[in-house]
């Protein structure tokens, strides 16, 4: 039976594993990967081909092959990492999602005050009656952004978090200025834009970065 040797992750020594056990362990590590079957088939064929090409004693040939591929855990980790979106894609996704939320809010506002479609009136009333919950959910959303960036990218996610928050907050501040300067009539928002709620929105906007940073550190700890 083919036997594989590779250094264990603790660095204590070498672990002996058969080819069959190696593939079984790799399947276990990739059990949640969407392309698990294709990866296992490709790696199995690749290792067999590489073993057939080695002009060395069997154990030495297999040791060289495993040193190239790494342990099942290391190989699976590389495939999981390759399937993740790039940092720039993640940043763009969060920024676009935030812009989408903002545009939906603006659309409901304009539709309620300038249109006659019942849906916009219903949506406006729902927002007015649950404004504090909307603010809470939006605040939790920023904490979740930090958590996901910390968990997926570790220390490298810190710069990404700063850029994401900075670029996402700017449209929010622009909308607040539009309302404050009367470009969009303040009277439109009197049904729920009370002084306490407006103050809470302003404070939450200022605290979005510290909140997302707290989520980032928690996510980074979870990834360790």
Image: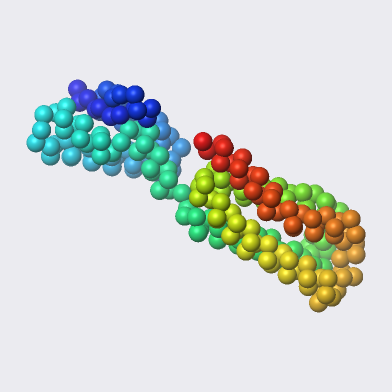
Q: Is residue 65 above or below residue 91?
A: above
Q: In the displayed orientation, state which residue is furthest to the left.
A: 55
On the question of residue 107 being in view, the answer is no
Q: Is residue 24 left or right of residue 68?
A: right
Q: Residue at x 70, y 54 (%)?
A: 208
Q: Position of residue 142 (x, y in %)?
A: 67, 51
The image quadrant of residue 193 is: bottom right
Q: Nearer the viewer, residue 151 or 3?
A: 151
Q: Residue at x 24, y 27 (%)?
A: 4
The total number of labels drawn is: 0
Q: Is residue 41 left or right of residue 190?
A: left
Q: Residue at x 89, y 55 (%)?
A: 196
On the question of residue 121 being in view, the answer is yes
Q: Is residue 118 above or below residue 131?
A: below
Q: Nearer the viewer, residue 220 or 120?
A: 220
Q: Position of residue 218 (x, y in %)?
A: 61, 40
Quadrant placement of the N terminus: top left
Q: Position of residue 172 (x, y in %)?
A: 72, 64
Q: Residue at x 9, y 36 (%)?
A: 55
The image quadrant of residue 37 is: top left
The image quadrant of residue 36 is: top left
């Amino acid at each position: 039976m083919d036997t594989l040797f590779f250094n264990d992750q603790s660095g204590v020594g070498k672990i002996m594993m058969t080819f069959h056990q190696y593939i079984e362990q790799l399947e276990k590590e990739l059990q949640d990967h969407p392309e698990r079957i294709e990866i296992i088939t490709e790696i199995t064929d690749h290792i067999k081909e590489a073993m057939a090409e080695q002009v060395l004693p069997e154990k030495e040939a297999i040791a060289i092959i495993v040193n190239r591929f790494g342990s099942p855990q290391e190989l699976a980790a590389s495939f999981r990492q390759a399937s993740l979106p790039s940092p720039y894609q993640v940043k763009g996704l969060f920024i676009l999602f935030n812009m989408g939320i903002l545009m939906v809010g603006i659309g409901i506002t304009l539709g309620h005050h300038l249109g006659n479609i019942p849906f916009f009136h219903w949506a406006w009333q729902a927002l007015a009656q649950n404004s504090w919950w909307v603010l809470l959910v939006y605040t939790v959303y920023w904490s979740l952004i930090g958590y996901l960036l910390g968990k997926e990218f570790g220390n490298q996610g810190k710069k990404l978090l700063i850029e994401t928050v900075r670029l996402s907050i700017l449209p929010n501040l622009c909308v607040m200025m539009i309302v404050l300067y009367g470009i969009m009539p303040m009277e439109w928002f009197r049904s729920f834009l009370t002084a306490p709620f407006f103050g809470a929105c302003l404070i939450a906007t200022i605290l979005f970065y510290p909140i997302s940073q707290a989520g980032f550190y928690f996510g980074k700890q979870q990834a360790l």
